[in-house]
Image (tube, coloured by chain):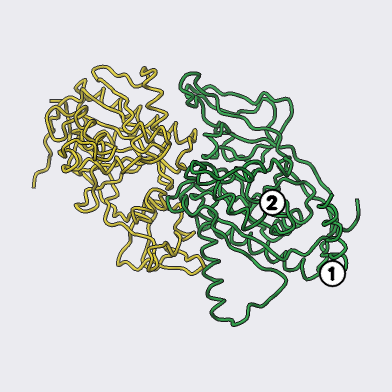
Chain colours: A yellow, B green
Amino acid sequence: MSSFSSCQSVREARRVAIFGGTHGNELSGVTLVHLWMKNGTEIQRRGVETRPFITNPRAVEKCSRYVDTDLNRAFTPENLSAPADGQLPYEVLRAQEINRMFGPKGSPDAYDVIFDLHNTTSNMGCTLILESSKDHFNLQMINYIQKALAPASCLVLLNEHPLLKYSTARSVAKHPVGLEVGPQPQGVLRSNIFESMREILKHALDFIELFNEGVEFPPCSVPVFRVSERVDYPRDANGNIMAMVHPNLQDCDWEPLNPGDPMFQTFDGKTIRYQGSGTIYPTFINEAAYYEKQQAFVATRRETLSANAVRKA
Amino acid sequence: MKDQSRLPRLSRVAVCGGTHGNELSGVYLVRELLKVKKKKKKEEEDEDGGAMSVLLVLSNPRAMQQCLRYIDTDLNRCFTHACLIGPTLDKTPYEMRRARELNAMLGPKGSAGAMDLICDLHNTTANMGLSLITYSDHDWICMHIFRHLQRQIPDTPVRYIHYDVTSKESYSLDSVGKHGFAMEVGPQPHGVVRSNIYTTMKSGVQYMLDWVHFFNSGVIFDGGFMDVFTVVKHIDYPRDGETHNITAAIHPQLQDRDFCLLRPGDPLFQTFSGETLRYTGSEPLYPFFINESAYYEKGIALCLARKRRVKIPSVRVQTEEEERQNEQRYTSEEEE
């Protein structure tokens, strides 16, 4: 067995984008991007072009999650290659435009890094969302951010699940990173949530600057929560929700849920318990936008990823 | 004032949910109460008559369907006298039409046929506990209900908010009844149902109905004192002159501090460049609806109220004789 991992050479991250308003009512990102479009001093770093961008301006204008369809699910191969005519939903046309501007997805011309800024009504605190367990650049960046924020915590959600993974706006880039900060109601700007997101980005950009200057980041471990399944609300024959997240589970994102623990409470007060075979770590508990996606929470399992040393090529 | 107020029986009560389609506690509570009512009807041949009927209403079904606050316009601003009597044309917004329907069902507002009591269920993203919102600081029915809720619900702060607005200008659904209030429970994001918030609202409605039942049965409720928060004004966010976008957020020291006294000089907002903007009013006031998401578009970052101690008389239901005398008087007033 090899006792050392070689240092991975990764191309410089020259072109970085910061997406806000992918969901028009998630206000931290909208506000930060508007701020930086007006005055981008704060996000400038040596050797990096950092571009703030509002991905869904019509939804931002309406202060709604989306206009026709969820932009953050719209970047599928089918959508991106569909002939652009008047019949396509607004967000699909928008996805194609974003793919042209920041991609094309999967090509060498794509942006190096995209940070996509989101809020959630769930009590998830600061969360970074990864789509691949093998992107060592991203893993190192996350490790750097976590160390910089300590003792404040920033947890990592890994969604590599073949069925539950979805085609995000940020997936156009070589290194996509989701920032999810909560709890914050939709359509509300909370000062503490806003400042937390701002701080995460500050450290992320610092990392990129250091990386581009040639700093080598040694191997490290990154604890993550890997998405394993989606759990819906109990529903009646007509598809109506029959129960609410149980008070014992509400706001307990990232905490263990063991078989037998209370999970839901019916409207007339009965407890429904978790019947799975092992401990899971729920997150996205009671996210407003997920009622229509049939999701009361996402079940995850804890895992530790190993990041190779990385250095600019 | 009199030591005791004798008031007409409250025979017809309405509980309304979904006036804003994304305020989900009321939506699910009314649905649940409808289910229970349906089940009860099947089990009992005769409705147990009783002194009170409860009408359960889902006020804005189209907005509920899409989980939006409203479709065309805010339903809970459509109940002014002027809005209700206007003509219904093709271009009349959905909520205006619906308001007129609800007025016919629960009113007409200002008439003898209106519901005795309307309780309209709402949620807020602000940290307001359970707040009863009314147009009167001398509606003894509403105020006694408030007192009852405050005593029965010890683990949630319960408060009484009064908008000093005339009956004609009152604009919300609860103003259609002879007595009425909005029952506002928070904090809860819109589009979400939190079990603790649902349970609080369910208790609130149950205790309210209990009180009405006791009242109708002749129980005398002692008078006393209570705190009333009377709305004075609201403050908007600082905004960019060109884009009209907000340029500051509610200050972290004010966020979630609804009903904590705001003194001149206290922090109000924090700009995005980190500057603190302070309250420059001369009078200390009580803030509420701090950072309510639906109020951004109405230009309201927070509302401010004065608190005063109000004396309320004891109340009991009128006897049938007293009720008859009262009706005669009402009729002759109408004729005038």
Q: Secondary structure at mark 2?
A: loop
Q: Position of residue A268 (x, y in %)?
A: 52, 68
Is A156 displayed left or right of B126 in the figure?
left
Q: Is residue B146 visible?
A: yes
Residue B83 position, x and y percent, is: 62, 42
Depth check, front residue: A172 or B93:
B93
Q: What residue is rendered at 67% in x and 55% in y?
A: B107
Task: Check disc 2 and report the residue beneath it.
Answer: B109
Q: What is the chain identity of the residue bearing mark 1? A: B
Amino acid type indicated by mark 2? Lys
Q: Tag 1: Cα neighbours inside 10 Å, few (<14), some, or many (≥20)?
A: few
Q: Is residue B325 above or below residue A24?
A: below
Mark 1, residue position:
B320
| Residue A218 in view here | no
Across and down, in percent, residue A258 comes to 37, 63
Q: Nearer the viewer, mark 2 or mark 1?
A: 2
* The quarter of the displayed image where residue A73 is located: top left
